[in-house]
Amino acid sequence: MLRGKRILSTYFYLFLLVIYLPLLFLLAFSFNNSLSAGFPWRGFTLRWWEAFFSDPVAPTTVKNSFVVAVAVAVVATLMGLGLAFVLVRREFRGKNVLLSSLLVPIAIPFLLIGTSLFLLLQRTFHLERSLLNLAFAHILVALPYSSLVLMARLIGFDRSLEEAAQDLGATGFTTFRKITFPLIRPGIFVSMFLTFIISLEDAAIASFLAGSDPTVPFFVYGRLRRFEGLPLVMALSSFMVLIALAFTCFFLISAIRAKSE
Amino acid sequence: MKPNGKKLELKEDTTIRERVLNIFRKMKKLGYYWRLFPAVFWLVVFLALPLSVMFIYSLWTKVGYDMIPTWTLQNYLDIFVRKEGLYLRLLLKSLGMSAAVTLGSIALAYPVAYYISTRGGKYKYVLLALIMTPYLVSWVILILGWRMIIGHNGLVNILLMGVGLEPVKLWKTWMAVILVLIISWAPWLVLPIFVSLEKIDRTLLEAGADLGASPSENFRKITLPLSVPGLLVATFFVMIPTFGEFVAPVIAGGASGATIGTAIEEAFKRMNYPFGSAMSFLLVGIALITSFVLIRKTGLRTLMESL
């Protein structure tokens, strides 16, 4: 019994170590004074970080990724809100059809969203590859996540609170602002976070729709594929890792502070 | 007559008002539905339309750098016969990869979710956040990190040589693809499995223990069956994207990493859109059927709550 418990906790810490190992290696070896990305260690240097910051493309990929991700998070969450309200609170013909087609973007691999939108936007409408096209596609794949999260929140929602507010003379908008919104706010945060991550993570759709203005995963994929400038890619990757770590620290500190208050 | 007439007029007056009010109410009721418009528009223009366009192109034929509308099923037939069934083999390889990655990553994630759920105490959410962090950035970004671990000059080989063993070729092999995918997916699956474990009523376990069940019996007969919904959601989350995976096979697999995903990407790179579309569309069909079965089994409610 006790042995089983010890094995489980050992496994847990081993798992943590394994998933953090590539991060630690990236961070450490981005300071390695060697042209080959990785072993052996040839001394400390800042030149890859300098190369990264002075590169004409690499720093803009970070900006591109974040701009697209923020836009996707906001738009997909707003659309998801609309869908969730109607799907949870109304019965209408075609509801099941809508629900099932809503799931289709996550029921097929991202690659296929990429190929089909490429054929429509680039081959049929002859639009240029751009971040805007990419944002369109990311909003599509984010929509199922945002609406499902918000629907879950709305299903457990006590509607008598809204009715009470309206009986007391609140207008529709005031009711939403004072009652509905605060109650679904956690759902909105989760939805924004999820959709943001989905957009930030994606390399598959981006490789079909983003053009000369790449996002980070697409840029890294291209460099890795052609096997060029890898030390710079390590600095860029490490930069993203640092952002992720900073985000988690911030999240943990605010969570702990919220608990202690 | 006169008072009567007046009464009649009044009555008519109210019915007209009633009617106008009714129409107004109906419009207000219908007005609620404008909320659907943006999402429905998106689903039509960016999902239904492109998939239809892709289906149409899959029936065309590539001639030189152009496509001509031939309306033939040859492209679909080609998947099975061209290059002695190479594409069929790649498709099966992809499905196999999906199954292996799903099983592997669930097997890695389950004990982690179980540990957090049963032993996390008040640190449950801190531990979950720690697990998720590495993948806030795309795992594509972490792949160079993996290369330093299982690559040619990587940590594993350095350790092997350190103890006097021969170095092994891990990078640019099929093993590397599966390994990288399994470890990349596992942290994402901790959450849905954790959610389903949290929902299990603890009193059931106490009742089991009172009736003389050992902890392992309790786990096998109560915890595991009740966490099946979480496992199905996890399966849905990994299996479907992995069907079309091409980034990891290209980077970590090299020449031995060909899958249906890389074949589709290749076809699009070479501007063979009709054949690429046919392969894509076949994969759409397979993925939709698999998803349908999985979502049917889990139910929409469970899927919602696992996010």
Image (cartoon, rainbow, N blue to C red):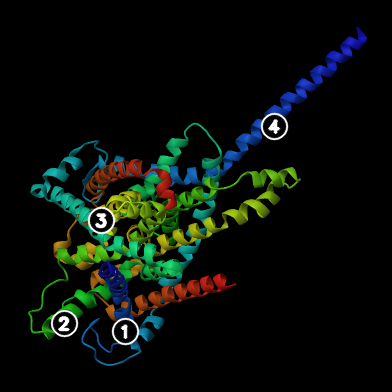
Indicate the quadrant where residue A220 lies: bottom left
Q: Secondary structure at mark 4?
A: helix
Q: Nearer the viewer, mark 4 or mark 1?
A: 1
Above or below B3: residue B80? below
Above or below A38: residue A189? above
In this rendering, do the residues under marks 4 and 2 share a single chain? Answer: yes
Task: Give me the C-alpha separation between circle 3 and circle 1.
Answer: 31 Å
Task: Give me the C-alpha separation between circle 4 and circle 1.
Answer: 67 Å
Q: For mark 2, what is the residue? A: B159
Q: For mark 1, what is the residue? A: A28
Q: Secondary structure at mark 2?
A: helix
Label 4 neighbourhood size at 10 Å, few (<14), some (14-19), many (20+)?
A: few
Q: For mark 3, what is the residue? A: B102
| Residue type at the position of mark 2 | Leu
Label placed on residue B24? 4
Q: In the picture, which quadrant includes the N terminus of chain B?
A: top right
In the picture provided, is A260 more to the left or to the right than B52?
right
**Residue at x 62% of width, y 51% of height:** A180
In this rendering, do the residues under marks 3 and 1 share a single chain? Answer: no
In this rendering, do the residues under marks 2 and 1 share a single chain? Answer: no
| Residue type at the position of mark 1 | Ala
Label 2 neighbourhood size at 10 Å, few (<14), some (14-19), many (20+)?
A: few
Q: Chain of mark 4?
A: B
Indicate the quadrant where residue A225 lies: bottom left
**Does the image show residue A172?**
yes
Q: Nearer the viewer, mark 4 or mark 2?
A: 2
Q: Position of residue A110 (x, y in %)?
A: 33, 54
Task: Give me the C-alpha separation between circle 3 and circle 4.
Answer: 54 Å
Q: Secondary structure at mark 3?
A: helix
| Residue type at the position of mark 3 | Thr
Above or below A126: residue B165? below
| Marks 4 and 2 close (CB-CB < 8 Å) | no
